Amino acid sequence: MIEKVVNPSCLRNQHPILKALLPWLSEPGQLLELASGTGQHGVYIGQHLPHIRWQLTEHPSQIQLSQPWQQAANLSNVLPCIELDINQPNWPAELGQFQYSFCANLLHYVSEQEVHHIFKAVSRVLNTQGLFFCYGPINEQGFTSDGNASLDKWLKEDVNAQAGIKELSFLQSSAQQQGLTLKQRLNLPANNVILIFEKQ
């Protein structure tokens, strides 16, 4: 097994995320997490919500990151990570259908075109009235804090010139084009939000 990697931001935000999602994850169902990374969110939320069957996914090049967390937790409802390149044209049919999907700190790491593709693909795998939870920073007619402005600058200069924090209006419009309606916006610490989209 590879060495366990600890993501400090996950440790900071995992409880606020769980607390915010609790009312929305009351019904049993299958959940698809995109870009699970270390798998810490899935493990933490999964141990508090045993009725949610949490499927970890990650790009093939990073798929082993979550193995130590998932195996150490040994939770029957948090499934081993499977390969998913979110940019591939068609996601594998064997993924199946889900009542929920979740991503954390993903949308600002990718381009606007990739955001369009993510919404399109998630819409395909969600059941009608299924929910897509997107956690992270957003812009509202510009940056909402100096910290977000600095994060955006770093993303564009050091990670991906096409990345950056997205405007709420853009996210809402992009999702709507794929049959995902913004149902709720939850404010979380450190200028982060959870946007909840519902499949129509």
Image (cartoon, grey):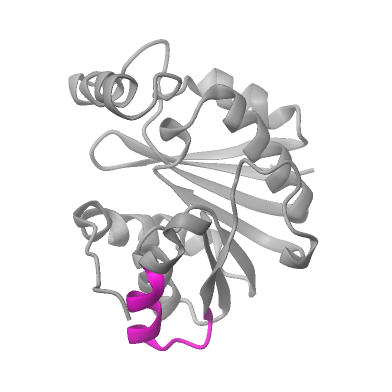
Horizontal side of residue 179 vs 132, given as left or right:
right
How many tags in the picture? 0
Q: Residue 126, located in which quarter of the rendered image?
A: bottom right
Horizontal side of residue 152 vs 20, given as left or right:
left
Q: Nearer the viewer, residue 153 or 119?
A: 153
Residue at image coords 33%, 85%:
72
Residue 150 picture location, percent across and down = 21, 21
State whether residue 79 is above or below residue 131: below
Residue 46 picture location, percent across and down = 45, 75
Range drawn in magenta: 66-78
Query: Residue pushed farthest front?
Result: 61
Q: Is residue 69 magenta?
A: yes
State whether residue 190 is above or below residue 75: above
Q: Which is the main secondary structure of the residues drawn in magenta?
A: helix
Residue at image coords 27%, 54%:
13
Q: Nearer the viewer, residue 185 or 77?
A: 77
Q: Residue 120, located in which quarter of the rendered image?
A: top right
Residue at image coords 55%, 19%:
169
State whether residue 125 is above or below residue 180: below
Residue 176 picture location, percent across and down = 71, 29
Quadrant occupied by the C terminus: top right
Horizontal side of residue 21 vs 144, given as left or right:
right
Q: Is residue 190 magenta?
A: no
Query: Residue pushed farthest top?
Result: 141
Quadrant occupied by the N terminus: bottom left
